[in-house]
Every structure is written in C-alpha cells, then in structure tokens.
Image (cartoon, coloured by chain):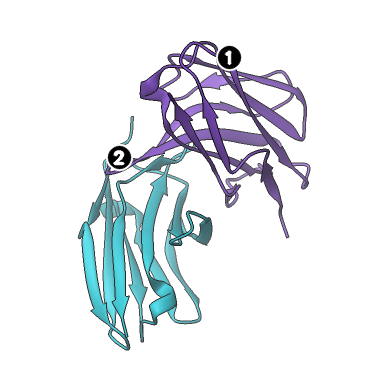
Amino acid sequence: DVKVTQSSRYLVKRTGEKVFLECVQDMDHENMFWYRQDPGLGLRLIYFSYDVKMKEKGDIPEGYSVSREKKERFSLILESASTNQTSMYLCASSTLTGRHQPQHFGDGTRLSIL
Amino acid sequence: GIQVEQSPPDLILQEGANSTLRCNFSDSVNNLQWFHQNPWGQLINLFYIPSGTKQNGRLSATTVATERYSLLYISSSQTTDSGVYFCAVGSKLSFGAGTTVTVRA
C-alpha cells in the first residue's frame, strides 16, 4: 500500500514565524501535491511538483513556497505565517506513467497560527 | 480553471438506504477521481474514473465525459459511509466543495 506521511498531525505557530510542513511518500511517485482544506471550500491546490527540483504554482500559491530536493520528500514553507493560513494542510502523491493515476493522501496537518 | 460542482451539499440517510451523488464539471477532462473523507479527516481514494462505470462493493461510479458529469452511487448505506465525498477533476485535481453524508442507524 502507498504510504504518504506528514510530519505533524497538529501544529501551533505564531504570526510571523517561518513554518515548515514535511511530506514523505514511499512509492517512488513522480508527482507530489500540497492542498489546503477550509470549511465549505473543498481542497485547493497550493503547489505541485512532478519531479525533483521541479515545481508549479497551484491555485493559491501566495504566501507559500515549496522544496523538493529528493523524490520522496516535498516540503511546504510558510515564509511568514499569518492567521489566514490557519487551515488543514494535505499532502498527496501519484505516479504518472502515460496516464493519470489515483492520488494518495496523507492524514493531514491541522495548522493553527496565533 | 475547471469548475467543479457537487450536489447535494448535504445528505442524511437512514441505514440501508441508497443514494446518488452528482459531480458536474465545466470542461472535458481525462482525470476524474472520487474520494471519501472520514470523520477523522483521512481522504481515501474511491475511484479513478475518467469515463465509464466501475464498482467496488456497495459503491459504484459512472462518468459520462461527453456530458461532463459523474455519479457516485451508495447502496445499502452503513454508518461507516458517513463523511464527506469529494469529486476532483483535471491534471491538477480541482476539487468540488463536497457532499456531506450522514448515515443514521
């Protein structure tokens, strides 16, 4: 079974802090994604990566950056955390072998910015 | 981007009932997936179904790509089916707002 592991289930940080959310997958997937989920809005894509050191902006990249130095790890960075970034953050991965494949999600990180 | 609309937003079922959830999308896609988010927040992939029909136990899904909609069927619902069901489409997986299903014993 595919395993997508997010480093923290719950996280509390202060306004202005630099925050790192880590995600690791164990299936050698090419694609990795970061979403945030807010009530009534579904999941919105922040960034995705289709290969090491490659990244593309999603629908709401402002205030975030990402890093993918190794294939199995995809990090989301809040450069200067703000209260409107309080949310549930979900990481996902998938493989792409000529056609789309099912996405697999981690358990999520519930981030509170005070 | 692709617009995804799910209906109904909320659904309350008695255990044993059948139901249909709908997903409409605004553009042709070659990637459509259904997910279930359980009450603990875990997202589970139910179906990868850009076209055609698939069945997995009491769940089945049909996508009519030419008419830009997909349906998820839940038969003989159980309390463990409660949660939020999401439809997601496209290469970057644009998500709908979800259908919240509550199954009562």
Position of residue B4 measured from the top left corner of the image (x, y, whole percent): 29, 44
From the image, tell me which residue sits under label 2.
A41
Judge whether B103 appears above or below B15 on screen.
above
Determine if residue A73 is in view.
Answer: yes
Residue name at image x 36 percent, y 59 percent: B84
Q: Which mark is residue A18?
A: 1
User: Dot 2 lies on which element?
Assistant: loop
Q: Quadrant of the C terminus of chain B?
A: bottom left
Residue type indicated by callout 2: Leu
Q: Is residue B14 left or right of residue A23?
A: left
Q: Quadrant of residue B7?
A: bottom left
Q: State which chain is coloured purple.
A: A
Left or right of B27, for residue A22:
right
**In this orientation, which residue lies closer to the viewer: A28 or A17?**
A17
Q: Categorize mark 2 by other alpha carbons within 10 Å: few (<14), some (14-19), many (20+).
A: few
Instruction: Work out how far the residue at label 1 is from the one at label 2, CA to CA, in angstroms.
Output: 25 Å
**Which chain does tag 2 point to?**
A
Tell which of B42 and B63 is nearer to you. Answer: B42
Label 1 is placed on what type of residue? Lys
Q: Residue at x 60, y 45 (%)?
A: A99
